[in-house]
Image (cartoon, helix red, strand yellow):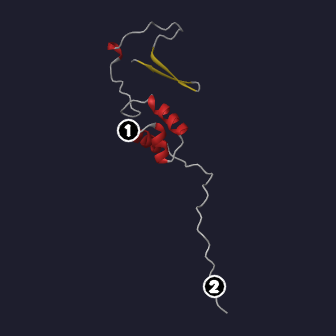
Amino acid sequence: MTNHALELPVTAQPKSNTRAQRTRAQWKSLVDDFATSGLTKTAFCRKRGIATSCLYRWLKVFAGQSASGDFIDITEPVSSAPSASPRTDGNPHWQVELELGAGIVLRLRSR
């Protein structure tokens, strides 16, 4: 009795239906790589294996950020800043009011 091994052709594994989970920092790196690649969005996405819709989304996310990251220098003294019209809500001590969204308001006042 001879023992014959049956060889089956090796087939490619099917693509996984799970999506790659990338961090914000990883997307920032991809967006930066795209900006310096000289490739079209379609060609860059095909080369990196990402969906063009994802690249478009993250380009939009990072478009509003300053080149230095999340830091914004606001060291100009309030006294030399252009003055806005005085507030009429009965609290004249507030110098700056920022509405941050989700009902959050940041108020800064001078001493």
Of residue 13 and residue 110, the one placed in the foreground of this image is: 13
Closer to the observer: label 1 or label 2? 2
Q: Which residue is mark 1?
A: 38
Nearer the observer, 16 or 44: 44
| Amino acid type for the residue under numbered disc 1 | Gly
Q: Are marks 1 and 2 in contact (CB under 8 Å)?
A: no
* Vertical relation: 30 (above or below) 103: below
Q: How far from the left and from the top, in percent, is residue 109?
A: 43, 18
Residue 77 horizontal side relative to residue 96, left or right = left
Q: Give whichever of discs 1 and 2 has the lower sequence position.
A: 2
- Residue placed at 32% from the left, 20% from the top? 76
Q: Nearer the viewer, residue 11 or 25?
A: 11
Q: What residue is disc 2 on?
A: 4
Residue farthest to the right? 1
Whole-Å distance between the Cαs marked 1 and 2?
55 Å
The residue under the point 40% across, 42% down is 33
Few, some or many C-alpha atoms within 10 Å of disc 1 (few <14, some 14-19, many ≥20)? few
Instruction: Give the quadrant of residue 51.
Output: top right
Secondary structure at numbered mark 2: loop
Q: Position of residue 10 (x, y in %)?
A: 58, 68
Instruction: Identify the residue at image location x=59%, y=27%.
Output: 102
- Quadrant of the rendering where the C terminus is positioned: top left
Residue 104: image location, x then y, percent:
55, 25
- Give the amino acid at mark 2: His
Residue situated furthest bottom in the rendering: 1
| Quadrant (top left/top right/bottom left/bottom right) for the N terminus | bottom right
Where is residue 69 shown, x and y percent of the image?
39, 34
Q: Secondary structure at mark 1?
A: loop
